[in-house]
Image: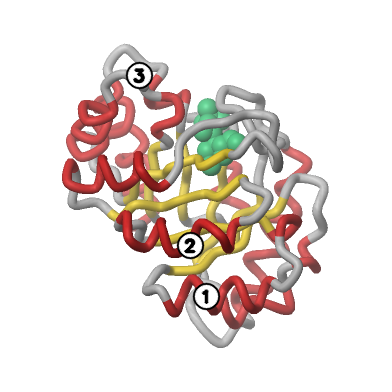
Amino acid sequence: MRLAPSILAADLTCLGEALAQCEAGGADLVHFDVMDGHFVPNLTFGPPVVAALRPYTARYLDCHLMVANPEALLPALAEAGAGGVTMHVEALDDPGRALRAAADLGMAPGLALRPGTPLRAVLPHLDAVDLVLPMTVEPGFGGQAFDDGVLPKIAAARDAIGRASRPVALQVDGGVNAVTLPRCLDAGADVFVVGTAIFGADDPAAAAKAFRALLDREDR
Ligand code: DX5
Ligand code: ZN
């Protein structure tokens, strides 16, 4: 069970401090929401910010690409020190080629789905991914309400992953908090992206620790 705080919800003027809070809170990964203003209406940060923050933490940098042409960013993200890249299946003409390109650059490839995209869109690629992410909000903004309607898709993804030829992580992202995280656990998720519920708290490191403790109970 891994915890991935999303720094989109952090104080963007102090991202180095946000990484220190992730470490103090026992985060396993740090989640970067890369948005281009085309695939989603919002515009955030990209490879230069990932590269600038790389020296501030030893944690694995988990990049969620909400961009229209994710393949074009892969070389720069690899150079920046990204550990994993999760691309939206809706943005890819040839998911197999994009996944191979990420792996060839030394990054763990993942596929994300919008809430309305059926799981079958990623099933042909399960043997080529390290991670599947069924989004629990429409991608683009932090702080949205969790969509319970995605839970059956998460459970179906857990079943499909059980039949895959390699270990595949099952990430959830969007509206994950102390109330909704247990629902994701029950559905079979094992990587939890948490933005607002950590960085919106008075003490983000303490909030992260509380989530880590919840996951530790499951790990035992
Ligand atoms: C939304 C992003 C999320 C977002 C999660 O498009 O992918 O990672 O930061 O934030 P919360 O936890 O606030 O929903
Ligand atoms: Zn995300």
- Does the numbered disc 2 mark a residue whose Cβ is under 8 Å from ligand 2? no
Residue beneath label 2, please? Answer: 74
In this view, which residue lies farthest toward the bottom? Answer: 165
* Residue placed most toward the observer, 139 or 172: 139
Residue at image point 70% right, 39% down: 38
Residue beneath label 3, please? Answer: 11
* Residue placed most toward the observer, 172 or 17: 17
Q: Report x, y in % for residue 99.
A: 57, 73
Q: Is residue 176 in view from this perspective?
A: no
Residue beneath label 1, please? Answer: 101
Which type of secondary structure does the marked residue at label 2 adopt? helix
* Residue placed most toward the observer, 171 or 149: 171
Q: Is residue 123 in view from this perspective?
A: yes
Q: Report x, y in % for residue 216.
A: 31, 49
Q: Report x, y in % for residue 132.
A: 59, 62
Q: Determine whether label 2 and label 1 are within 8 Å by CB.
A: yes
Question: How many other residues sit within 10 Å of disc 1, few (<14), some (14-19) or many (≥20)?
Answer: some
Q: Amino acid at mark 2?
A: Leu
Q: Determine whether label 1 and label 3 are within 8 Å by CB.
A: no
Question: How many other residues sit within 10 Å of disc 2, few (<14), some (14-19) or many (≥20)?
Answer: many
Query: How far apart in space, not on screen, are marks 2 and 1 (Cα)?
Result: 8 Å
Circle 1 or circle 3, nearest the eye = 1
Residue at image point 52% right, 49% down: 64
Instruction: Report the disc number at residue 134.
Output: none
Task: Give the mark nearer the N terminus: 2 vs 1.
Answer: 2
Circle 2 or circle 3, nearest the eye = 2
Which type of secondary structure does the marked residue at label 1 adopt? helix
Residue at image point 58% right, 63% down: 71
Residue at image point 36% right, 22% down: 12
Ligand 1 shows up in the quarter that is top right
